[in-house]
Image: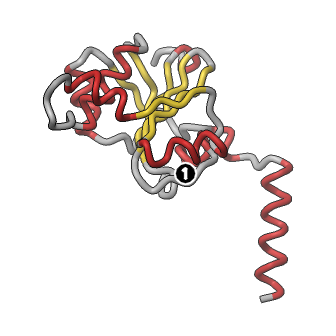
Amino acid sequence: MANQKQLARLIVAPSDTDPDMLYATRVFIGDPFIFLEQHGKRTLVLSDLEIDRAKRTAKADEFVMLSELEHEIQGDTKTPPPYEKVLAHFLNKRGVKRAMVPATFPLGYAKELERSGVSLETSNGLFWPERESKTAEEIKLLGRALRITETG
């Protein structure tokens, strides 16, 4: 397996049900969105409805509007392109040729990325191994939650 530190990291999932996405972004969003970590920079591709809230609360360096990428692909047509085509377009614009994805990465997206020249590798074990250890802030919040549940 290639050195995982050299690979871009890619997740496409809603953060309210995917612990890897929530860990990466620290924002709850109910619809799937794109997370890309490349050369230490974290980029989120979000719907127009979610981008402002994410800018205020998410852990990321850059925010890209999904609609801008859609317009780049669709040109003069009125029909928006399929999500997987937008994903492939975004990664190709960023020069991503290889990426590490969680084992839960959607197969349809993986097939489209393969067709567009992006090879994927799944993580061997946890996608974010550091999730196994809690930070001081997380421990504090867990303690607070326990006290709340104990008092009823």
In the rendered image, the quadrant that contains the C terminus is bottom right
Residue 80: image quadrant is top left
| Figure colour scheme | secondary structure
**Label 1 sits on what residue type?**
Pro
Quadrant of the rendered image containing residue 139? bottom right
7 with respect to 132 (left or right): left
Residue at the far top in the pictured view: 95
Relative side of 10 to 28, left or right = left
On the question of residue 109 being in view, the answer is yes
- The relative height of residue 142 versus residue 115 in the rendered view (above or below) is below
Q: Going 41% across and 42% down the picture, which residue do you hit?
A: 47
Residue 127 is situated, as x and y percent measured from the top left of the image, at 54, 37
Residue 102 appears in view: no
Q: Which residue is mark 1?
A: 19
Q: Give neighbour class at mark 1: few <14, some 14-19, many 20+ (Cα, 10 Å).
A: some
For image coordinates 16% across by 25% down, the residue present is 76
- Of the pair 101 and 63, the residue shown nearer to us: 63
Give how far across and how far down residue 5 sits, in percent.
Answer: 58, 18
Disc 1 is placed on an element classified as helix
Q: Position of residue 142 (x, y in %)?
A: 78, 64
Image location (x, y in percent) of residue 14: 45, 50
Q: Residue at x 50, y 53 (%)?
A: 29
In the rendered image, the vertical position of residue 127 relative to residue 90, given as above or below? below
In front: 80, or 123? Answer: 80
Farthest residue in the bottom direction?
152
